[in-house]
Amino acid sequence: MQGAVRPHARAIEALDAEPVTVRTPDQLAGVDSLIVPGGESTTISKLLDSSGLAGPLAARLADGLPVLGTCAGMIVLASEVLDGRADQRAYGAIDLTVRRNAFGRQVDSFEADLDVTGLDDPYHAVFIRAPFVEAVGDGVEVLASVDGHPVLCRQGPVLVSAFHPELTDDLRLHELFLALAG
Amino acid sequence: MAEPTTTPSGPETSSARTGTPLVKRGLAEMLKGGVIMDVVDPAQARIAEDAGAVAVMALERVPSDIRRDGGVARMSDPEMIEGIKEVCTIPVMAKARIGHFVEAQILEALGVDYVDESEVLTPADEAHHIDKWAFTVPFVCGATNLGEALRRISEGACMIRSKGEAGTGNVVEAVRHLRSITGDIRKITQADPAELFDWAKKLQAPLPLVQEVHETGELPVPLFCAGGLAIPADAALAMQLGAQAVFVGSGIFKSDDPPARAKAIVEATTHYDDPQMLAKVSRGLGGAMPGLEIGGLETTFADRGW
């Protein structure tokens, strides 16, 4: 819809899968799994409404659509959003409470090495006006944290990160997602 | 690269680094496909966010008023910028004069998310732009051609916007500048490596950046479009010509129905290549801002910058 669509598409292509841009309900109906990219979560939420995607997306998510959400995507997929807008949608694909812009403004944006459960070497992660997770529900696995705040979580076929795996050349998280998506 | 002295609410993790080129260009990546709107007060900022803007540009007067009033245009009052920051959850940008690095220092201290070193304000230095590498806050700069864009990038700009002619409601200059930038990128992509030295000389741009354009086929940083966009079709035109996001200034708040027009321009930017959708969102928006012929202008902002 809006945001860092192309870097995600490049990562998916590099892993020999075929990316499709989704901006209409017809396009959504044709995909096996979905990435909700980084961008502005308020803008993405509004565009999902105005493009007629809100209903179909909620239905596909309830149906178990494998989905990767990065930064704004994590906010859109969470069950509750703090410091957001009252009219902002939270699709509840993963049982998380997320605080928007929790790490601060752009001058506080940072990159750092993360220890990720299941990966042998640290993952270099880029956080841009990033959110973090305040509370996780039962059945949510926390795969990485910064200062005690979860920033990478998984529940079933839903993987969300507060950072931007699409901005670096490290394909391990996209690889993990494609494995989850089968 | 200047290391920050404090990270107010950033992480405590020892490996964390702020203000790196990746982090600064990263925010521009996140704004792609979106609309950045000029606002002069908190009420307009709310309308912009309600309409789905990805960011707002806080300034005292929109370009068409700067053009009308004349005189020296400077950085906005910090109080006004803070008022807009308080009501917005989306990124807030603000303008500094070309070469006025102290205005930029003040904007960084205020915690704005992007500084626009802008030709719409009266230049403070007629030879030098700001050394943007020295800042943690990222910068966007205007450009009329590829050489200007690459010079700004060599000074540390993390986003380029084609200048167009701000405050005119006339898209012709935006098209000229965008076509000039993307056209030269296409030619450089096709050039023989030996020809890149001459390209660097002609463009008055650093050779390594010209070589990078040759290899990647795109600017090293995101390319957005600004200056004269007034209707949804203008935004879609810029996107189809290769812009990755758009800035709309006077076009929204100088029109008859700003909330409806703002929302329509956001939707046109998303669905820029879908004429059916563009026809739908362009309906019933009331009068657009009155436009100006470029030939009749006393001052052309686009000529400012070196």
Image (cartoon, grey):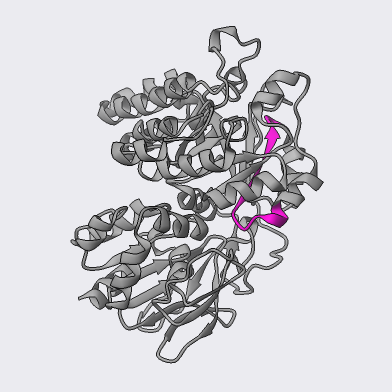
Residue B282 shown in magenta: no
**Is residue B218 at least partly visible in the picture?**
yes
Give the image location of residue B35, x and y in percent: 50, 43
**Nearest to the observer: residue A52 or residue B33:** A52
How many marks can you see?
Answer: 0
Give the image location of residue B93, x and y in percent: 64, 45
**Nearest to the observer: residue B203 or residue A5:** A5
Give the image location of residue B297, x and y in percent: 61, 11
**Nearest to the observer: residue B203 or residue B140:** B140
Give the image location of residue A146, x and y in percent: 55, 77
Left or right relative to A37: residue B89: right
- What range is drawn magenta here? B85-99
Kindly give the residue lying farthest to the top in the view shown: B296
Which quarter of the figure has residue A180? Answer: bottom left
Which quarter of the figure has residue B208? Answer: top left
Left or right relative to B191: residue A138: right
Residue B90 shown in magenta: yes
Which residue lies at the image location 58% right of the left edge and 25% below the top edge? B166
Which residue lies at the image location 52% right of the left edge and 58% below the top edge? A42
